[in-house]
C-alpha cells in the first residue's frame, strides 16, 4: 500500500544560533511539537540524523533519507552560526491523518505564530507525493517535488492539501480539505515543520 511523503521547508527570520528570546522560543519548543505529531495516528516516520552527529543539517548523516538538500531559493547560511531554516521530511498513511496532526494541537498553535519566526514567501512551504510501500524518500526528493510544485502547481507528482491526488493519480478531496471547504486556503497552507535538529 502506498505511503504519503511530506516535505516542509521554511526560511527563518534569524539564524537558529541567534540568542534572541524569540529564536530560542522557536528552537526550544520544536521538540515538543514533533513529539506530539509523532504520536498521532497515521504518522509513520521522519528523517532523523544519526545519533552523535555534530554541525548543521548539511554535515549530518541522515542514513536512508539521503544527503541533506535545500531548495534553490534558500539564500541564507549553511554554517552553525548562519543556518536559518526549518525543514522536515516524513511519511504518513494518508492525507487525513497528516491534516489532523498539522492543523490541531501544538502544531496548530505554532502555525498561528509562524510569521513571528518565518519569512513570508511566495514559494510553497510544503509538498506531498505518494511513494511505494518500503520506499524511503530522500531530502533531494523533497526538494525536487517542492520545486516542481512551485513551477507547475499541484499535480500527481507534487501536490498540496488544497489540490490533492490519490495514489492512482486521480484528484481527491476529503471533508474539510479542498477548494469548496474554505478550511485551508492555498495561500495560508503552512505545514512548515517545527521540529529542528538541535545544533551541536
Image: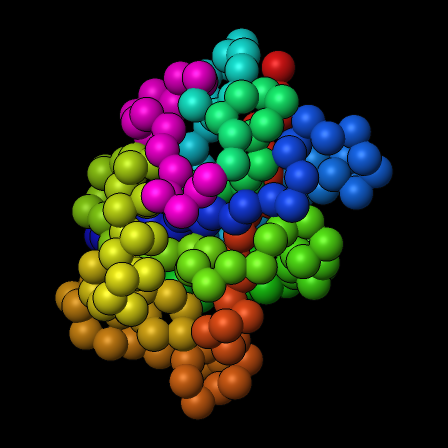
Q: Looking at the picture, how far across and down is residue 13, in whole percent?
A: 65, 45
Is residue 171 a member of the stretch shown in magenta?
A: no
The residue most toward the bottom is 180
Residue drawn at x 21%, y 59% is 157
The quarter of the picture where residue 128 lies is: bottom left
Front one among 191 and 55: 55
Q: Is residue 58 left or right of residue 110?
A: left
Asked whether residue 88 is in view, the answer is no
Magenta segment range? 59-75
Magenta span: helix, strand or loop, mainly?
Answer: loop
Residue drawn at x 62%, y 22% is 81
The quarter of the picture where residue 155 lies is: bottom left
Front one among 85 and 36: 85
Residue drawn at x 27%, y 42% is 141
**In this view, 15 is above or below 154:** above
Q: Looking at the picture, how far across and down is residue 198, in whole percent?
A: 62, 25
Q: Is residue 166 left or right of residue 75?
A: left
**In this view, 147 is above or below 21:** below
Q: Looking at the picture, how far across and down is residue 80, in whole percent?
A: 59, 20
Residue drawn at x 33%, y 30% is 65
The residue most toward the front is 75
Front one among 183 and 117: 117
Q: Is residue 72 left or right of residue 86?
A: left
Is residue 68 a member of the stretch shown in magenta?
A: yes
**Picture mark count:** 0
Amino acid at each position: 500500500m502506498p505511503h504519503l511523503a511530506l516535505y516542509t521547508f521554511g526560511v527563518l527570520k534569524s539564524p537558529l544560533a541567534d540568542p534572541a528570546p524569540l529564536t530560542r522560543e522557536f528552537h526550544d519548543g520544536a521538540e515538543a511539537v514533533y513529539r506530539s505529531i509523532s504520536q498521532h495516528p497515521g504518522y509513520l516516520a521522519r528523517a532523523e540524523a544519526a545519533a552523535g552527529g555534530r554541525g548543521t543539517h548539511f554535515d549530518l548523516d541522515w542514513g536512508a533519507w539521503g544527503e541533506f538538500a535545500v531548495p534553490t531559493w534558500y539564500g541564507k547560511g549553511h554554517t552553525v552560526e548562519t543556518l536559518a531554516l526549518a525543514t522536515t521530511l516524513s511519511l504518513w498513511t494518508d492525507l487525513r491523518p497528516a491534516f489532523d496532526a498539522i492543523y490541531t494541537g501544538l502544531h496548530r498553535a505554532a502555525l498561528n505564530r509562524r510569521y513571528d519566526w518565518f519569512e513570508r514567501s511566495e514559494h510553497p512551504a510544503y509538498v506531498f507525493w505518494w511513494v511505494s510501500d518500503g520506499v524511503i524518500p530522500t531530502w533531494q526528493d523533497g526538494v525536487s517535488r517542492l520545486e516542481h510544485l512551485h513551477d507547475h502547481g499541484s499535480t500527481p507528482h507534487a501536490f498540496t492539501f488544497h489540490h490533492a491526488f490519490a495514489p492512482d493519480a486521480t484528484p481527491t478531496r476529503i471533508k474539510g480539505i479542498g477548494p469548496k471547504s474554505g478550511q485551508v486556503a492555498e495561500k495560508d497552507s503552512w505545514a512548515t515543520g517545527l521540529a529542528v535538529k538541535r545544533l551541536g
